[in-house]
Every structure is written in C-alpha cells, then in structure tokens.
Amino acid sequence: MTTEIANLVHENKNLIYSIAHNFRQYHNKEDLFQVGVIGIIQAYKNFDDKHGVKFTTYAYPYILGEMKKYIREDKGIKVSRDLLKLNFKIEKANILLSQKLMREPTIKELAAYLEVPELLIEQAINLNNAIQSFEEPINNNDNKEMTLHDVISGVEQLDLDSLIALKDEIKQLDKLDQKIVVMRYFNDFTQTEVADMLGINQVQVSRKEQKILQKLRSRLND
C-alpha cells in the first residue's frame, strides 16, 4: 500500500468503521474494515474531481458494496423475510399484552404469547431497528430513479456526522415510514409485497417512498 493510499485510508477510517458497524451482527468489524479498505481504494482509482461531489460521498457506495459482497459470499447471509413478518405479529402482541399487563411485555412474555422461541423474538426486534441498506432505487415524479444514497449525495458537506445525521433522521420518521424503509431497502421486498403486508396499495407505497426521500433530503440540507 502506497503512502498516499495509506493516508487516504487513515483519513477515512471513521467512515469505513461507521459502515462496518451496521453489519457487526454478521461479521467481525475488523474484517469488514479490511474489506472496506478495498472499496475505498477502488473509489480512489475511479474518482475524478469532475464528478462534482466530495470523495467521501463518492466512496460510500464502493465501501458499502464491498462489505455486502463479502458477507454474501462468505456466509451466504440473507435476512429471513419471516422475521419481518414475525415483527408485525410482535407489534400486535405488544399492544394487546401492554393493555392486559399495564406495562411493556418482556421478550419472554412475547415469546410465550406467540409460541415462538425467545431468540426469534430478539432477532425480529433487532431487524425492525436496523436501517442498514440504502441502495434500493425508486421512481420520483420525473420517473428518475432515486436512492437513499442520492439523499446523502445531496448534502453539500458530507462527512461522518452527516451519515450519523441521516440515520438519526430515519429514526425520527413515523412507524409506518420506518417499516417501509426496512422492508424495501433492507430485505428487498417489492412494493407490491410491502403493500400486501401493510394493507395498502402499491401506488401508496411508491408515493410514501418518494415523500420519505424528499423529507430526508430536505432535513439534511437544512
């Protein structure tokens, strides 16, 4: 590794670690960091100032892509859609048990009520809290594809704080919007599948996705 690239990796190590942190339940963070280095080197080789974006903005999808590829090839990991379906059952059970117990039910109580192992309850809850993949395209009003990475790219000064801010803004979305983000971007559900599970139609899902991205872009540029 040349001194120039070594310095580049050092300057962007926080960015690489922040992305690796999202996949910590799947693989060792240090291994993911090394994979992220491959991504940032690829970005460095292809980057040109004419792209009109900061290097960190340009490098982000390279790093993310390498980590996803590594995880898929190394362990063949794919989050089960059954966990997402289970999460909706958990939410309903949580409401019913909260009313009955006059408090939040424990994982053990949820597992007993739904007659599923506690481990699955924990995994489903963790999945619901995970907003990790931002590369699924949707169509905006101009019929142009937009991704959550495009939202990031719209921020003039992207740095680690901006990435953290994006995740924080997603957490501020209402529950339905958060579900759509998880289902569409995290585990590759189609808009039709999301619509069926949420009891709405595909057009509504598409419109909501567009509004979510516009909202995030607006907040990050404020």
Image (cartoon, grey):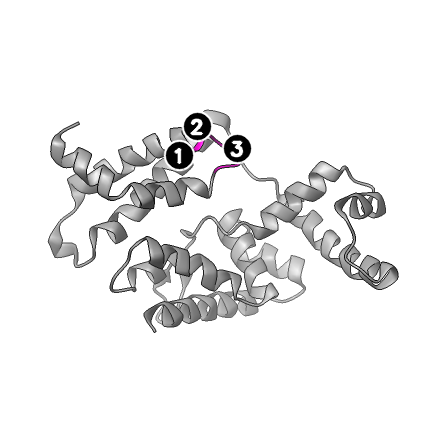
Task: Say whether residue 162 is left or right of residue 49.
Answer: right
Contact flag, marks 2 and 1 (Cβ < 8 Å): yes
- Circle number at residue 44: none
- The residue at 26%/44% (across/down) is 12
Residue type, label 1: Lys
Front residue of this view, candidates 165 and 50: 165
- Circle number at residue 77: 3
Residue type, label 2: Glu
Contact flag, marks 3 and 2 (Cβ < 8 Å): no
> Where residue 79 sits in the image (x, y, percent)?
57, 40
Q: Secondary structure at mark 1?
A: helix
Q: Residue furthest right?
A: 100
- Circle number at residue 69: 1
Q: Is residue 73 above or below residue 105?
A: above
Tell me the quadrant of the picture where the N terminus can be found: top left
- The residue segment tinted magenta is 24-29
- Circle number at residue 73: 2
Q: Secondary structure at mark 3?
A: loop
Task: Say whether residue 122 is left or right of residue 66.
Answer: right
How far is mark 2 from mark 1, CA to CA? 6 Å
* Quarter-of-image position of residue 176: bottom right
Front residue of this view, candidates 140 and 211: 211
